[in-house]
Image (cartoon, grey):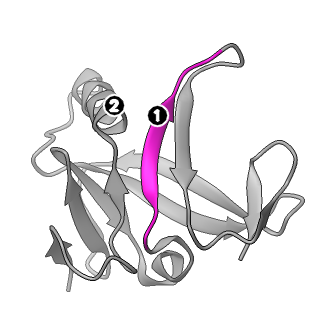
Amino acid sequence: MSATVENGDGDTVVTATEPAAEQARELMEGEEMDVSEAGLRLYVQQGGCAGLSYGMRFEPEPEPEDQIFESNGIRLFVDQSSLNYVGGSQLAFEGGLQGAGFHVQNPNVESECGCGESFRT
């Protein structure tokens, strides 16, 4: 069963900054997704030079076992296994000379690879 968490234990909540939420909302609307049901899935997978890497994708609805976090008007879907690594994180959107994109600000990270694409907890 999925659960919607708007605020709660700061160690397990996943949030999005306003710029990240705005960008995600625009992208979902561009894909003609219903932003009241759809969300951005944040997950962790094996890979990268530091051992773990983030994955993100838009999905029309959550899976039954997902935790659902609502932050700044968007829904974030996180499975329990990934939540063990990303609990307390904030999704940010950054732009710059090397391009724009989403970035996970994760307080659980002990080290990241040089390119910032993978991490270790």
Height in image: 93 above or below 103? above
Determine which of the numbered discs, if any, sits on residue 63 in the image: none
Left/right placement of residue 26 relative to residue 36 reads right
Q: Where residue 55 sits in the image (x, y, percent)?
A: 58, 54
Disc 2 and disc 1 in contact, CB within 8 angstroms: yes
Q: Where residue 66 sits in the image (x, y, percent)?
A: 32, 75
Left/right placement of residue 55 relative to residue 28 reads right
In the foreground, 32 or 83: 83
The image quarter in which residue 101 lies = top right
* Crowd around label 2: few <14 · some 14–19 · many ≥20 (10 Å): some
Determine which of the numbered discs, if any, sits on residue 19 in the image: 2
Left/right placement of residue 60 relative to residue 81 reads left
Query: What residue is rendered at 25% in x and 33% in y?
Result: 25
Query: What residue is rendered at 57% in x and 22% in y?
Result: 100
Left/right placement of residue 119 relative to residue 107 reads right
The image quarter in which residue 90 lies = bottom left
* Crowd around label 1: few <14 · some 14–19 · many ≥20 (10 Å): some
Height in image: 92 above or below 28? below
Q: Quote the CA–CA distance across marks 2 and 1.
A: 6 Å
Q: Which range of residues does the magenta coloring cover?
A: 88-96
- Circle 2: residue type: Pro
Tell me the SS state at disc 2: helix
Q: Which residue is mark 1?
A: 93
- Circle 1: residue type: Phe
As for residue 92 lying within the magenta part, the answer is yes
As for residue 14 lying within the magenta part, the answer is no
